[in-house]
Amino acid sequence: MRRKLAAGNWKMNGTKAALSELEALRDAHPDPAVDILICPPATLLSPAQSLVGNSPIALGGQDCHAKTDGAHTGDISAPMLVDAGATAVILGHSERREDHEEESHDIRIKARTAQAAGLMTVICLGESLDQREAQDTLDIIGAQLSLSVPDSSTGLNLVVAYEPIWAIGTGLTPTPDQIGEVHDFIRSRLERRFGPGVGRSVRLLYGGSVKAANAEEIFAISNVDGALVGGASLTEAQFSPIIKALEAAV
Ligand code: PGA
């Protein structure tokens, strides 16, 4: 019932030369059984749109401003992302929360603006290692979820990504039980807040050191509807096997 989603976050990686990887990805997946989303740097959205505009691969931004326009030097708005070819945007990634001191309430306002512009918002949540060791994970995730997700969310415009901070780019991943516990918790919270219809239709992604070698195991976990992939989304050779593992889990 929920279509699976393989999402790639290129972060601050990639100049025009990297578009050859996107082209290869497009050619490798002409008719995927899952949704595919690539979030390149904003500078590449327009040329990426020229490459994949007529293919099943969707494009997303990695952040947007809370306002739609105005005097905000260096920022990019949700309507600008739409104009450049994006249909989605990642919000509240832990690197944004850390590097730019973004708090959950900032993310909720951004998400509201992005959803109003027609973007699907991929809202990221995750605990630090200290928080996990202190057994605070579910409290942290619950608070981030309720504060970051706007009331305007639906199954179409909201995707939630669980990304433990200690698993991002480290090669460490939680156990399947740990992932399942958090995903089941997020699902029950969404059902309680939005009702079973919307709550069950929101896709939940796992993110943090997903690669070909662990994808199958992660995609077998209940309430894991796909992955948000950083490093292993940068090349077709690494991302394609993850997409195939997700297709096999459908
Ligand atoms: P990683 O990053 O796959 O490189 O660990 C995941 C993410 O930050 O979305």
Image (tube, rainbow, N blue to C red):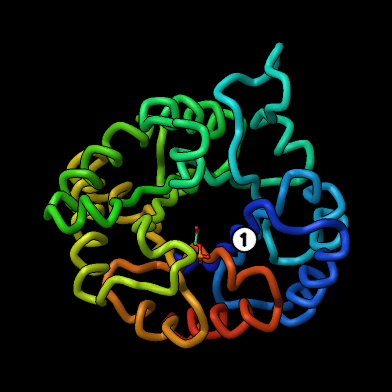
* Residue drawn 42% across the image and 48% down it: 124
Q: Is residue 162 visible?
A: no
* Residue drawn at (80%, 62%) of the image: 52
Horizontal side of residue 131 vs 24, given as left or right: left
Please, is residue 5 above or below residue 82 in the view?
below
Residue 32 spot, x, y in % from top left:
63, 77
Q: Which residue is mark 1?
A: 37
Residue 237 screen position, x and y as percent? 68, 83
Q: Could you say where residue 210 lies in the image, as x and y percent from the top left?
A: 46, 73
Q: Horizontal placement of 247 versus 76: left or right? A: left
Q: Is the residue 39 above or below the residue 167 in the image?
A: above
| Left or right for 2, reference 63 | left
Q: Is residue 199 visible?
A: yes
Quarter placement of the C terminus: bottom left
Pointer 1 local density, CA inside 10 Å: few below 14, some 14–19, many at least 20: many
Identify which residue is drawn at 44% across, 68% down.
170
Q: Quadrant of the N terminus?
A: bottom left
Question: From what the image shows, is residue 245 above or below residue 195?
Answer: below
Closest to the observer, 140 or 203: 140
User: Residue at the spot x=33%, y=81% of the render?
Assistant: 220
Label 1 near ligand 1 (CB < 8 Å): no
How many marks on residues? Answer: 1
- Residue at the farthest top position: 71
Measuring from the top left, give residue 144's x and y in whole percent: 29, 39
Left/right placement of residue 33 relative to residue 16 reads left
In depth, the one of 205 and 32 nearer the eye is: 205
Describe the element under mark 1 as helix, strand or loop: strand
